[in-house]
Amino acid sequence: MAIEIITDSTSDLTAQEARERNVHLIPMRVIFEDGVYQDGVDLDKETFYTKQAEAKILPKTTQLNPQEYCDVFQPLLDTGNEVVAILLSSKLSGSYQSACVAAGMVEGAERLHLVDSLNVTIGEGLLVREAVRLRDAGATAAEIVDHLEQLRPRVRFLAFVGTLKYLKMGGRVSASAAALGTMLGISPVVAIVDGEVRSVGKVRGKAKALDYTLDFAAAYPVDSRCPVVFGHSRCQEAMEEYARKVTAALGIHTYEWDELGAVIGTHAGPGCWGMAYVGLK
């Protein structure tokens, strides 16, 4: 019996990555003033950031409904295979609850395993990659789920926001604070805490971002047995410089990276970079 792995587009795996890893990718919907788009289908990341820069109102993402999950779950269950779905944090969207409702609607639900990632973007993608590794190593669906649930509270996600424009548009910072922060070159620091995106600090300049990361990693040491994933929004060069310095300082030998998509990108905008890893504690 094979194991099918599902995630949603908020994990920020590209369509090519998903194909290469044999992962089924469910597109979320992104709403702009001119219409509704499917994330990664008719709205790639380059187009998203272009449209965002032109928008007067912040785009929104909408949760998937139970029927949309059924339409993905049922054909895979009909093959007789086990299905493991690793989904966007239930603290950030009602989509996970919709998936739970769908699980009560499909036939073969005893072979459907839902995992609330309590994460998003590269943190969620990290868990997907770990699920793929275990599946390819011959683990059972139950073993994969148990492993992910043990890892989940130790996933650390840290990002530095390069522009205050979209935080101001979304009402998360005042116009005066945004103007002052921009003038001083201040970048808010965000992390995933208990399944939610929260502001945890501020830094001034890339050197301070590195210092903050190393202090964070000293408090939550990296578990080198698990993937390390870096991410960026339209600033790959800055991310690569950051990744080189972080990996050298922490003795990380391999890592992967993705571009941050609509969920984080809506509020952070371009120029955001960061990392996700599993901590030893």
Image (cartoon, grey):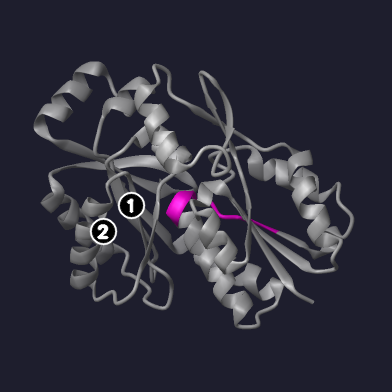
Compared to residue 272, the image places residue 137 above or below, namely below
Residue range corresponding to the magenta coloring: 114-122
Instruction: Check disc 1 and give the amino acid type.
Output: Leu
- Location of the C terminus by quadrant is bottom left
Q: How far apart are marks 1 and 2 (CA)?
A: 9 Å
Say few, some or many: other residues with alpha carbon within 10 Å of mark 2 (under 14 / 14 to 19 / 20 or more): some
Dot 1 falls on a residue whose secondary structure is strand
- Asked whether residue 88 is in view, the answer is no
Give the x, y percent position of residue 97. Answer: 69, 42
Q: Residue 158 carries which label?
A: 1
Tag 1–tag 2 contact (CB < 8 Å): yes
**Residue wearing tag 2:** 216
Residue 277 seen from this side: yes
* Residue sitting nearer the eye, 170 or 49: 49
Q: Looking at the image, which residue is at 53% across and 39% down?
A: 92
Few, some or many residues within 10 Å of mark 1 (<14, 14–19, 20+): many
Q: Residue at x 65, y 83 (%)?
A: 138
Which numbered disc flags the more N-terminal residue, 1 or 2? 1
